[in-house]
Amino acid sequence: MPVPADRTLHHELLGAWWPRSRTAASVLHIARRVVDDLREGAAGPRASAAARDLRKLLGARAVGLADLSGAVRWSGSPRTAPDPERLVADVLDTEDRSGRPPLVAMPLLVFEELAGVLVVDGDTRMTAVREVAAWTEAALERARLENSADLAAQAELRALRAEISPHFMYNAMTVIASLVRSDPDRSHELMLDFADFIRYGLARHREYTTVSDEFHAIETYLGLQRAVLGDRLKVQIRVAPEVLAVAIPYLVLEPLVENAVRHGIEPRLTPDGQGTGLVQVQGEAEGTDLVISVEDDGVGMDPARAQALLAGQDSAESMGLASVDRRLRTVYGAWYGLVVETAEGAGTRVVVRVPRFQPGVVP
């Protein structure tokens, strides 16, 4: 069948003339696979699979993806003259876009830096090769952005682990030490709780946990705070049984509860032991969502300042709040995150709303 002169580049890439809808669908399907296969870069474990799909698009004898070491992941059998590895090395050294027959080598630039080389063996139009090279560059750029976001989220999580309040630790240890003689059983119990809390906060290689584990951690934290503040701190914790097994990002609730105590309740307690405060933590299902609220009846704040804290714009105190919000939005999307309800003298309520089921979020 003759090929129409106005056939699209998608037809050209596939090397055949199909109905437009079928061709576009096939190209997009392969494009999605290429993006997934290049998530770890041109040197990643699935680079060979990406080369195989690019070869399908070009209809070439062979397609290779090379990383900066010069190693080539081939799909198909390239001709041996000139040596493909030598050609790649030349491109890596000179960034020469011209290529040399019968092989064509196109540098792959990621944010204007050389990240690899696309090598094509076969009678393929240069316009198609350039289009596939640009496509591959876009996939590598996306992979680098996603990896950077993951590294940033991991760095924030490490910072949260290291941000256990020295003030809280000092007060907790002082109370434990004061009970060693007067109430050794209580002292021993609090020491075990303190060790359990620290162990959870410093746990390694843990990105997600369960609602059950997170609530256990905040119960331990609030129990230690009650040992420090005595009856001046009231606590109510309620969690629906059906959400206990729901997976959520690690260390989401503890920073919110600590903020409630440190910045909500403690400022209203006087040095002579007067004043009380209530912290309430509640978790329940609302349809397909999990909703957790952390509420205190403390001093509250100006809503504009709460917004600045949530945006990470107001001193080191915003670290926990802003970090939790960013992590939630990264995992679940822009529609999710934290909602802060507050006013001066009216306490603060922070609401976490996330899906009960999210692909990839497992404890």
Image (cartoon, rainbow, N blue to C red):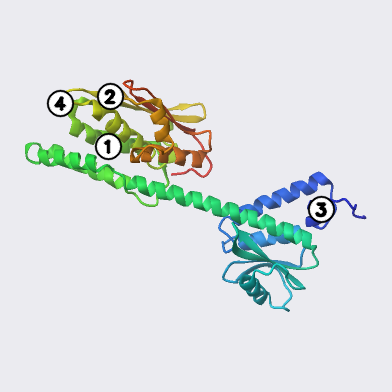
Q: Amino acid at mark 4?
A: Gly
Q: Which residue lies under the disc numbered 3?
A: 11
Label 2, label 1: how far apart the Cα atoms are: 15 Å
At label 3, the amino acid type is His
**The label number, if any, that marks residue 278 in the structure image:** 2
Please state which amino acid type lies under the numbered disc 1: Tyr
The residue at 21%/31% (across/down) is 226
Label 3 crowd (10 A; few <14 / some 14-19 / many >=20): some
Q: Amino acid at mark 2?
A: Leu
- Tag 4 residue: 273
Q: Secondary structure at mark 2?
A: strand
Q: Position of residue 210 (x, y in %)?
A: 40, 39
Which comes sooner in the sequence, label 4 or label 2?
A: 4
Q: Examine the rendering and report whether any part of residue 56 can be seen.
A: no
- 276 vs 132, left or right, is left
Q: Nearer the viewer, residue 120 or 186?
A: 120
> Dot 1: few (<14), some (14–19), or many (≥20) neighbours within 10 Å?
many
Mark 4 and mark 3 lie on one chain; the one further toward the N terminus is: 3
Q: Name the N-terminal-most of marks 2 and 3.
A: 3
**Which part of the image, by quadrant, shows the C terminus?**
top left
Which residue is disc 1 drawn over? 221
* Nearest to the observer: residue 334 or residue 346: 346
The residue lying at 51 percent from left, 36 percent from top is: 357
Q: Is there a contact, CB below 8 Å, between mark 2 and mark 1?
A: no
| Few, some or many residues within 10 Å of mark 2 (<14, 14–19, 20+) | some
Q: Position of residue 98 (x, y in %)?
A: 73, 69
Q: Nearer the viewer, mark 4 or mark 1?
A: 4
Q: CA distance from mark 4 to mark 2?
A: 15 Å
